[in-house]
Image: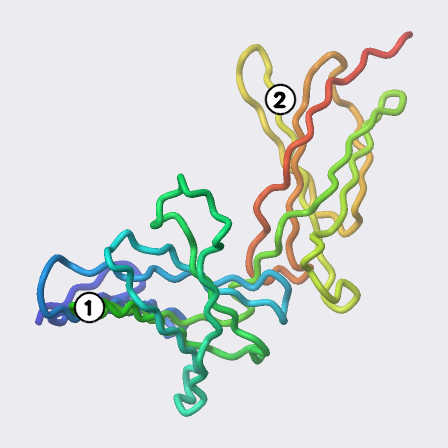
Amino acid sequence: MTTGTSGSGWILWITGILLVCAAGGRALELLRATETAGSPLSTPMVHCRCASYPNVTLCSWPGTPHVPPPRYIATYSERHNQSSTKQCHLIPPSSSASAASSTSQQLWHCQLPSLKLLTDYIINVTAVYSGGSSSHLASFMLEDIVKPDPPVHLRVSQQSKSLFVSWSPPPTWDNLDIFPLKYQILHQWEHRGTPKSFKLGPFESTHMELKGLTPGRRYLFRVCAKELLDLGECSTWSSAVQVTIAKTRP
């Protein structure tokens, strides 16, 4: 057995097991493979996200091109109460996915309902093959994995010398009155062939007036959403809207 330290965490190798534990005990990653024969087994790399705090938590991992494909078992529990272990409801890759897509790019999901606030959880996803099994064990707190879906219906219009940018909250985010969102605007342009970008916000409203933009220049706008108290991270950027600032008559 060998051990090593790096930064704020430590890594421990044991035969067939890789354990990564960050300082403070909040983060835990455990990858374990047991094989009886054949090539190394693919380990399901699990990522969890809460798209609507605190009700919608989904853990996902890419499938594997292994033939025959493995059977997955997913369970979760409170980190300090192993007797609370529950089965996670598995959602296989959509049958409507493009046949041209690689199996390894299709995501498996499992839903984790009714998680407690401010509680550490452990999820264990095991891929069971004919020649053995491979597991990914991860720890998370609901508040750390909050990431809304992107805002929708982004609109940009010009009135006189001002631009008015508006959008709608992500429709998947419930309880806006109890858990409001804030937003950032990203606008991008080119100046003499050099890309430029600037972030504005955060704003609690879903509309904003922008002044002082350069007439005749083309701008590209996106917006992202984040939980008001800074839980988790901002959503991915929304679809972009492009607009060229019209030159106003003197």
Return the mark for residue 109: none
Query: What colouring method underlies this structural image?
Result: rainbow
For mark 2, what is the residue?
Answer: 189
Query: Percent x, y for residue 30?
Result: 28, 69
Q: Quadrant of residue 250?
A: top right
In this rendered view, identify the residue nearer to me: 65 or 20: 65
Q: Secondary structure at mark 2?
A: strand
Position above or below: 24 against 203: below
Q: Residue at x 16, y 71 (%)?
A: 34
Q: Residue at x 18, y 70 (%)?
A: 132
Assess disc 2: are there few (<14), some (14-19) or many (≥20) residues with their C-alpha within 10 Å of its C-alpha.
some
Position above or below: 183 against 181: above
Q: Residue at x 32, y 68 (%)?
A: 71
Q: Amino acid at mark 2?
A: Trp
Query: Percent x, y for residue 33?
Result: 19, 68
Position above or below: 110 against 121: above
For mark 1, what is the residue?
Answer: 130
Q: Nearer the viewer, mark 2 or mark 1?
A: 1
Side of 34 relative to 87 (left or right): left
Query: Percent x, y for residue 141?
Result: 49, 72
Query: Percent x, y for residue 96?
Result: 51, 49
Side of 161 relative to 131 (left or right): right
Side of 235 relative to 125 (left or right): right
Q: Amino acid at mark 1?
A: Ser
- Of the image marks 2 and 1, the number of the one nearer the N terminus: 1
Q: Secondary structure at mark 1?
A: loop
Side of 34 relative to 102 (left or right): left
